[in-house]
Image (cartoon, grey):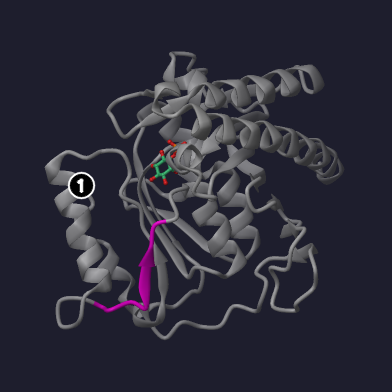
Amino acid sequence: KATDLQDILGFTIQLARKAGALMLEGSYAIQRAGAGSIGEKKNAVDLVTEYDIKVEELVRSEIARTYPHFQFIGEESYSSGTRPPLTDMPTFCVDPIDGTTNFVHGFPYACVSLGLIDQRVPVLGVIYNPFLEHLYTGVRGAGSFLHTRTPAAPNGQCGGTDRLPLAPARPLPGLASALIAVEWGSDRAQEPIRCKADSFARLAGAPPRGVMAHSLRSVGSAALNFALVAQGALDMYWCIGCWPWDVCAGIVIAQEAGAFVTGSKDAPHDGIVTEAVLTGRRYLVIRGVAGTPEESSLDVQKR
Ligand code: IPD
């Protein structure tokens, strides 16, 4: 029920701020301590720190205390083998630190991403970047918002709460006038990297082979890419290899801001959360603005 979701939103915002404080403490500690405190998962660029685990534990335990009947899927517990099946039950889907590479380098684009799934549909999302104090929230059917302490909106207000997108979406005549987020990801085998680089070249490069978009950005956090599309700062995010905790909160925030979220042909967006928990990688395209004629040019080199 909507009222329940508003209560849960209040709880989730408090939790995101608590998690953010721990992230800041962790990021400074890691930068002081150096590389010794950084671990690796599937390869040398898939990083994990003690703070990914600490933040997930904080989030998991507070959810369990407040909502004992909710299920929990988290990136780090999933990585270490705790893989609960997705059911119809309310389920928090959490990335404790999205943008771990940024987090260890002190590049100020990392966030905690807290998504709630109900009846297998993402219904609530909170994404908090403690470095910039940008907090994004979305509730299905009730809009999405950016809460800031410094000016972010074109109205020049000094912080506060602004509905997303910050400025009215205007139709994009085509990809050529778009600012597009892409990510290199952590799969660095030559073949997928070559495919990605080729696709990036087609987006950034000049015609006839490319569409010469305004530019490409790699923010380094899937969740923040969703949030930035919702905000209107990015026109689109093209993502390969996202996991449900990367996208769950962002789906709600982006959709509530009027963005279009879709998966590849074999993974429609409503299947991302329901299937990807078990089956892993899916592809996702988000468009901030409908009606880009070259959309099909993105449908390249997907595997
Ligand atoms: C990663 C980031 C990155 C995206 C990867 C994610 P992590 O999350 O969101 O931008 O390209 O697919 O796994 O590992 O920092 O939580």
Front-lying residue, 70 or 104:
104
Q: Main secondary structure of the magenta part?
A: loop
Residue assigned mark 1? 303
Against 284, residue 89 (above or below) is: above
Q: Position of residue 98 (x, y in %)?
A: 51, 40
What range of the chain is rendered magenta? 211-218
Against 45, residue 70 (above or below) is: above
Residue at image location 80% in from the left, 69% down from the top: 158
* 213 left or right, relative to 88: left
Front-lying residue, 36 or 260:
36
Query: Ligand 1 within 8 A of label 1's CB?
Result: no
Against 137, residue 98 (above or below) is: above
Q: Quadrant of ligand 1?
A: top left
Quadrant in the picture for the N terminus: top right
Residue 29 location, quadrant: top right
Q: Position of residue 283 (x, y in %)?
A: 35, 48
Q: Position of residue 88 (x, y in %)?
A: 62, 28
Residue at image location 64% in from the left, 32% down from the top: 25
Magenta residue check for 144: no
Residue at image location 62% in from the left, 26% down from the top: 55
Residue 80 location, quadrant: top left
- Asked which secondary structure carries label 1, the reply is loop
| Amino acid at the residue labelled 1 | Arg
Against 208, residue 109 (above or below) is: above
Residue at image location 30% in from the left, 25% down from the top: 42
